[in-house]
Image (cartoon, grey):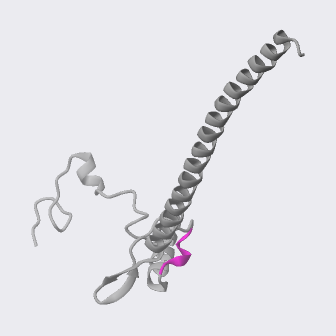
Amino acid sequence: MLDPELLERITARRVELDELEGQLAKQLAEVRAERDELAVAERVFDRGSEQIADERASAALAPGQVGGRPVMLIPHRTPEGTMLPPDYQRILVCRAAGRRTGHGPAGRRDTGSRRHRAGQAGTATGEAGQTR
């Protein structure tokens, strides 16, 4: 016959392994559940990212209407005035030229007459005591 002590040790080891199997099965179930939750979260994140990207793309290109004509609600930004209509570009060129030469409303630095600065009040004709 076999030794009863050996049979007892085998039974004890089997009980230990059964307990370990239960713990590992529980841990495996928890890991699988968490992995499934992460997969769902990843899909939700991807859908949200796609939706936000679509909204940004459509908002950036969505034309509005002014006076019955389609216009961009938020114009594209450029560092220069090259995207302006030709009329506006001509205005910018004229203003810049006026600043360089000192002529025109943008280039004037002397806005008052010399008499007013010197304390001599003049009239509309520029002469003291004379009226038009």
Q: How many marks?
A: 0
Q: Quadrant of residue 124?
A: bottom left
Viewer-nearest residue: 74 or 30 = 30
Position above or below: 105 against 67: above
- At x 56%, y 76%, the residue is 82
Toward the viewer: 108 or 33? 33
Q: Is residue 101 above or below residue 122?
A: below
Query: Is residue 94 rendered to the left or right of residue 21?
Result: left
Q: Position of residue 127 (x, y in %)?
A: 18, 62
The answer to which quarter of the image holds residue 125 is: bottom left
State the residue at coordinates (80%, 14%). Answer: 9
- The residue under the point 59% across, 38% down is 30
Percent coordinates x, y for residue 94 in the rendering: 48, 76
Tell whether 48 sits left or right of 63.
right
Where, quadrant-wise, is the N terminus in this rendering? top right
Which residue is at a point 44% across and 79% down the rendered structure image? 88
Q: Residue furthest top?
A: 5
Q: Residue furthest right?
A: 1
- Depth check: 82 or 40 in front? 40
Q: As displayed, is residue 76 above or below residue 116?
A: below
Q: Position of residue 52 (x, y in %)?
A: 48, 63
Q: Is 68 displayed left or right of 79 in the figure?
A: left
Stretch of the chain drawn in magenta: 80-84
In this view, the residue farthest toward the bottom is 68
Q: Is residue 82 covered in magenta?
A: yes
Question: Is residue 124 in the magenta section?
Answer: no
Looking at the image, residue 40 lies above or below residue 30: below
* Quarter of the rendering occupied by the C terminus: bottom left
Magenta residues: mostly which secondary structure?
Answer: helix
